[in-house]
Image: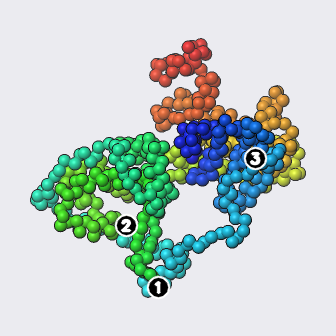
Amino acid sequence: MENITVELVRQCLGNKFESFYYLPARGTRGGILLAWDATVVQLLNPHTTTNTLTAVVKPVDGPEWWITGVYGPQGDREKIEFLQEIVEVRELLAGPCVLVGDFNLLVNLEDKNNAPINRKNMILTLKHEDQIITGQEEIAEVVDDFYDNLFGHAPARAHSLDLDKLDVSSKDLEHLERPFLPQEVERVVKAMQLDKAPGPDGFTGRFYATCWHIIKDDFMHALDMFHRTDMRGLGAINKAIVTLLPKRPGATELKEFRLVSLIHGAIKIFDKVLADRLAEELPTIVGVHQSAFVKMDITKAFDSVQWPFLIETLSKLGFGGRWVNHQDHSDDIATVQSTMRCQIGSFPCKYLGLLLTLREQRASQLHDLVDQMAARLPTWRATSLPKSGCLLLVQSVLCAIPIHAMMALDIPPKTLLAMSKLCRGFLWCGKDKANGGNCAVAWDTVCTPKWAGGLELPNLGWLNCAMQARWPWLQHTDPLRPWSEFQINVPKESMDLFRAAANTTIGNGCTALFWEDRWLQGYRV
């Protein structure tokens, strides 16, 4: 989790644990939580690094000691850096220390256990058009082509049916489109199979059933947005893990494999709620003699059906626009792609060198900015440069690299800290890291003006704040910009900086804020 609240800690650990420190997670891993019962012990002086969270432990009675929580990375290169990170953290601690957490490391090779792997379900060879395919990439290509030909191409519609002549009765099914009710969603969640294989989110039914009282409000808000046809963020969860399971031992051809799709838990719950609603009406829509037809066709005909005919039939039966659009929303994308002759992409993506996402960007997503700065260091011969030369390179090159990103993005504090550490390390040591003993003065002093005793290097935090203040400035001074009419989310510090620095001249009064802008001889009301 990126944000942990007191309520969440109490729900997970109990009411006594209302004091805590945490290191936010990166995606689905990397988070660390240190929580304590204040009647027994106190934790003070928290310190974080990329993979650790450290604090001093002060029992009610007894000597002080240190605790360091860790969450080790997955990659081999990152693991080496992680071990060095632990060494550096330990060097900073005076006294006993306990190291706890998930190291993602093995002490002995025999500790690695691959016994559960079911190798008979692995596709090592595949027969295709009288050829034996062995390479994994070649097998994947054959599988993609096979299912693309099977599901992905619907023939052109040459004929249509006059449904009115067939005497197809229409029902009032508007109640199927009513807003989602907490009771019906909870009923579906509680009825989920607890330990079935998870989808891309990694959560089984047990998670949703056990934590429903925690996620209920957020989940219902998401369903409400979907009901209002607000599809923002849907692409992030509308995904599936697709795998092939052999129908019989020794399967070698694709037709001998069964296609299994593991979808996101949220989508599964949404579909199940709609299915439960529909189940009440099915006996009056589909006759008993048609049930075998439905079961037979749905096993292999999802993407090969004639969608225009299906939409016409659903509308004739009485299904409303929302229900029909839910079935047909993917066709809208295909129409746009065909008309504009463009490719369909997905977020996150890069544009003009910047990563674009649908949500606020995390520090892990902007690590490329730190890597760009770090990549410059090996090209400079720092050992042969005087301190004035290092100072010039930091000021004119390193500190200039993130400016382009700062003009468009609100850089997270963790990323800004990593950038500042690179600048500090190169200035004092000529490398990417510098310990406290290597630094002549504090970095905040280095970033102060020369008249105040500093070296006048940019403070990246304030530089980021100033660059974000450009948005309200441009919005007020250049209303012809295409985005000027939109509500731009600007950090509070940047907005305060803008209002403190800008004077407003009253015109027609449409853009000036009476209480907040300085329009009265340079002052606010």
Q: Is residue 235 visible?
A: no
Q: Is residue 184 visible?
A: yes
The image quarter containing residue 76 is bottom right
The kind of residue tagged 2 is Gly
Can you say which quadrant of the picture contains the C terminus?
A: top right
Image point 48% across, 37% down: which residue? 482
Say which residue label 2 marks: 152
The kind of residue tagged 3 is Leu
Residue 256 coordinates in the image, percent (x, y): 40, 78
Left or right of residue 369: residue 236: left
Say which residue label 1 marks: 131
Image point 51% across, 21% down: which residue? 513
Lower sequence index among marks 1 and 2: 1
Residue 104 coordinates in the image, percent (x, y): 66, 60
- The mark tally for this picture is 3
Lower sequence index among marks 1 and 3: 1
Q: CA distance from mark 1 to mark 3?
A: 55 Å
Q: CA distance from mark 1 to mark 2?
A: 24 Å
